[in-house]
Amino acid sequence: KGDTATNTLKPAKLETGVEVRVPLFINEGEIIEIDTRDGSYLNRVKA
């Protein structure tokens, strides 16, 4: 709890092999949205 209060990021590797930085609350297997212009994390996608 509290991971959303700060913008602390961790590295994550996507299925495509690209590495991006995502918030600490993102877990392996979750679907996320990435800004393709700069590779930054946008949000978590709810299925």
Image (spheres, grey):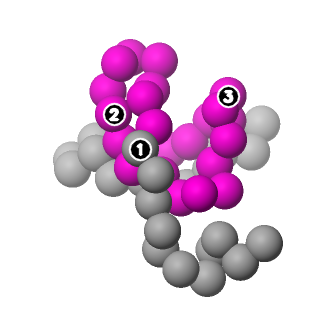
- Name the side, left or right, on which 2 lies relative to 44: right
- Name the side, left or right, on which 20 lies relative to 15: left
Residue identified by numbered label 3: 29
Give how far across and how far down residue 14 sits, in percent: 45, 26
State the separation of the CA atoms marked 2 and 3: 14 Å
For image coordinates 61% across by 82% down, the residue present is 5
Q: Residues within 10 Å of mark 3 (few under 14, many from 20)?
A: few
Give how far across and how far down residue 15 sits, in percent: 47, 18
Amino acid on which the number 2 mark rests in the picture: Glu
Q: Are marks 1 and 3 in contact (CB under 8 Å)?
A: no
In the depicted structure, whether residue 3 falls above or below residue 22: below
Q: Are marks 2 and 1 in contact (CB under 8 Å)?
A: yes
Residue identified by numbered label 1: 11
Q: Is residue 34 visible?
A: no
Which numbered circle lies on residue 19?
A: 2
**Quadrant in the rendering for residue 45:** top right
Give how far across and how far down residue 31 sits, in percent: 62, 35
Viewport quadrant of the N terminus: bottom right
Query: N-terminal of the two: label 2 or label 3?
Result: 2
State the SS at label 2: strand
Amino acid on which the number 1 mark rests in the picture: Pro
Give how far across and how far down residue 25 sits, in percent: 66, 56
Viewport quadrant of the C terminus: top right
Q: Residue furthest bottom?
A: 5
Residue span colored magenta? 12-34
State the SS at label 3: loop
